Image: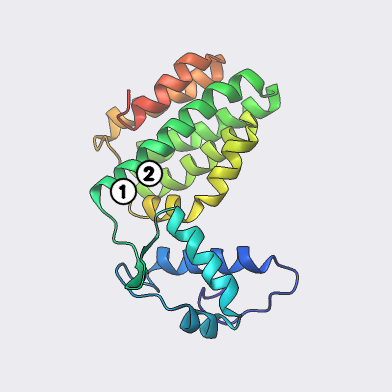
């Protein structure tokens, strides 16, 4: 993606979605800082679009918690709190653990074999104590499980919430800091997927993130 707050050519894109994605990206990378006031006319000028899609994008970002609005006072980038971080973490863990359960029930042998391969990559990153690697590999694993589980409502919600999820994961730190303990927990997820044990997979995902 190009710089999020540069003008862009909307041809071939859904304009509202592109503005939403670019403003979300700007919040995630700090181009729009926490607490910064947001003025629709200024953002529209910087993006080279009209104010209407900017206003719509700000409303959507408010719904997922990246923007705060006080009527007749301000619209600003939200300031992350401990509670907001915990809320996103809890949402992600519950969604991922349920995805693991239903992916095992509904997935093909090929899809589940891919899930095991992706889980192996998470185990490897954890054993190396590579935080960024854990984020990247676990994100790929749980995205695969979400699509394999095939719940269209959950997929729609996850797509809309992506900016909030990425803001949280950009600051992620593991619940379990000891590499051996953490890796054992990820390995339990991997083994449950390999054994096609849906209940254990759900439980193991929650355990990795301290929600068991």
Residue 69 or 110: which is nearer the viewer? 69
Q: In the shown orientation, is residue 11 left or right of residue 149?
A: right
The span from disc 1 to disc 2 (Cα, nearest Å) is 6 Å
Circle 1/circle 2 CB separation < 8 Å:
yes
Q: Secondary structure at mark 2?
A: helix
Q: Circle 1 sits on which residue?
A: 84
85 to 189, vertically: above or below: below
Question: Residue at horizontal 57%, vertical 15%?
Answer: 196
Residue 163 spot, x, y in % from top left: 47, 56
Q: Residue 153 lies in what quarter of the image?
A: top right
108 to 21, vertically: above or below: above
Q: In the shown orientation, is residue 61 left or right of residue 37?
A: right
Which quarter of the figure is the N terminus placed in?
Answer: bottom right
Question: Residue at horizontal 59%, vertical 74%?
Answer: 52
Residue 160 or 211: which is nearer the viewer? 160
Mark 2 surroundings within 10 Å by alpha-carbon count, few (fewer than 14), some (14 through 19), many (20 or more): some
Mark 1 surroundings within 10 Å by alpha-carbon count, few (fewer than 14), some (14 through 19), many (20 or more): some
Residue 178 or 47: which is nearer the viewer? 47
Q: Secondary structure at mark 1?
A: helix
Residue 39 or 136: which is nearer the viewer? 39
Q: Residue 179 lies in what quarter of the image?
A: top left
Looking at the image, the residue that sits furthest to the right is 12
Q: Does any portion of residue 1 appear in the rendered image?
A: no
Q: In the shown orientation, is residue 124 left or right of residue 70?
A: right
**Colour pattern:** rainbow
Looking at the image, the residue that sits furthest to the front is 72
Q: Circle 2 sits on which residue?
A: 88
Instruction: Give me the disc on residue 138.
Output: none
Q: Residue 54 lies in what quarter of the image?
A: bottom right
Question: Residue at horizontal 51%, vertical 59%?
Answer: 60
């Amino acid at each position: 993606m190009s710089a999020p707050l540069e003008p862009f050519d909307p041809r071939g894109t859904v304009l509202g979605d592109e503005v939403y994605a670019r403003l979300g990206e700007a919040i995630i990378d700090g181009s729009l800082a926490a607490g910064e006031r947001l003025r629709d006319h200024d953002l529209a000028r910087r993006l080279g679009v009209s104010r209407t899609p900017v206003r719509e994008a700000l409303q959507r970002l408010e719904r997922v918690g990246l923007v705060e609005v006080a009527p007749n006072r301000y619209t600003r980038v939200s300031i992350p709190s401990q509670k907001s971080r915990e809320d996103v973490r809890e949402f992600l863990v519950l969604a991922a653990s349920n995805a693991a359960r239903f992916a095992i029930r509904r997935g093909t042998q090929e899809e589940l074999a891919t899930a095991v391969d992706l889980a192996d990559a998470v185990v490897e990153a954890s054993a190396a104590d590579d935080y960024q690697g854990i984020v990247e590999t676990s994100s790929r694993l749980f995205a695969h499980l979400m699509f394999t589980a095939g719940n269209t409502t959950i997929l729609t919600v996850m797509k809309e919430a992506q900016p909030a999820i990425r803001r949280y994961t950009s600051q992620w730190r593991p619940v379990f800091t000891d590499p051996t303990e953490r890796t054992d927990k990820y390995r339990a997820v991997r083994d449950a997927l390999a054994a096609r044990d849906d209940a254990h997979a759900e439980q193991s995902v929650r355990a990795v993130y301290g929600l068991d």
